[in-house]
Image (spheres, rainbow, N blue to C red):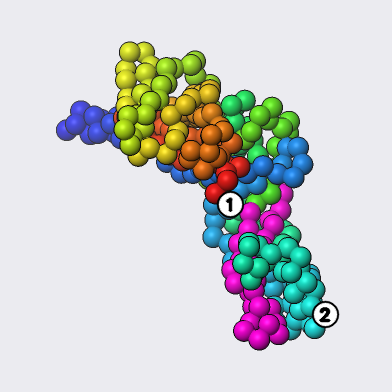
Amino acid sequence: MFRFGLFWLCAASLLVQALSQFPTDVQFHDALPGQTPGEVRFDPFQSIDWQQLARRHLKNFSLSHPTPEQVAKLKKQMLDHPLDETGTSSEIQFAAPLEPAIKQGFYYAFSMDGIRSLQPERLEGTMRYQLNQDRSTIVPDVFFGQVVSIINPPAAGDDAFVIFSTSDLSFTHLQAAKFTARKTGKQDIYLHERDGKQSQLTVNDEGLFDVLVFTSFKIGVSEYLLVKWKADTENQYGGCNRQYSLFVVNQGLTLVATNRLGCDV
């Protein structure tokens, strides 16, 4: 009986150790270029009430009691800077301090240079608006925003993804594996090989089959593979000039996220 209990105690201990090595709370969002060196923007991982933040921090327009001057100013902005060719809507931005929920976690930027700690600094929200039917007042349409963060030193190239975890993470850079991609008909086929073990993934063709460079990092027990694709200079798949994919290599090869920017569509 004692040996049986000792067996399960050891098994439970090993299970806890294994689970602690795998970062089950890791999430990824696209990293977006900032306005200054070292600035990285991303969509928040937490739920944010952007409309409520606009009520508190939007200085140029009162959602509750807009003045005639404020309405006239936003009308003029719509004429001067319409959101699209229809000319029926525009946007206004506002800054806000970090919400408490955003401070509860750890952030990292993932680039070809490596993975480095990221420090959120503020929120930047957007109110998209249009005019009512008789064009007499402003009608808020949708509210959204991003987290603005700072990384030091800045990456030599682009930051591709932002990593979020509720616990501090450690990373290990892995020696280069073999990764190839090819287009077959209407599908893209990716092949990862390390130490003689192959993992293959087939996805619908989106033009991501021309590899420029890639790198691998270990997070917990899993390998994460960051791939930078060549720009779509011939505009066959939207003309994107900045294209990244993130894969995880665990039981097989799985696509985690794709970040495409600078597109023509």
User: Image quadrant of residue 116?
Assistant: top right
Instruction: Report the magenta residues as a range.
Output: 120-146
Q: Which comes sooner in the sequence, label 2 or label 1?
A: 1
Where is mark 2, residue-wise?
69
In front: 252, or 20? 252
Question: Residue flagged by tag 2: what amino acid is it?
Answer: Glu
Q: Is residue 218 above or below residue 65?
A: above
Q: Is residue 35 visible?
A: yes
Q: Label 2's element?
A: helix
Q: Which mark is residue 43?
A: 1
Q: Is residue 207 magenta?
A: no
How many numbered markers are drawn? 2
Q: Is residue 8 above or below residue 146?
A: above
In which quadrant will I find the N terminus? Answer: top left
Q: Mark 2 against mark 1, which lies toward the viewer?
A: 2
Q: Residue furthest right?
A: 69
In front: 107, or 208? 208
- Horizontal side, residue 43 vs residue 120: left or right: left
Q: Position of residue 171 (x, y in %)?
A: 53, 27
Q: Position of residue 228 (x, y in %)?
A: 53, 29
**Residue lying at 36% horizontally and 13% vertically, measured from the top left:** 195
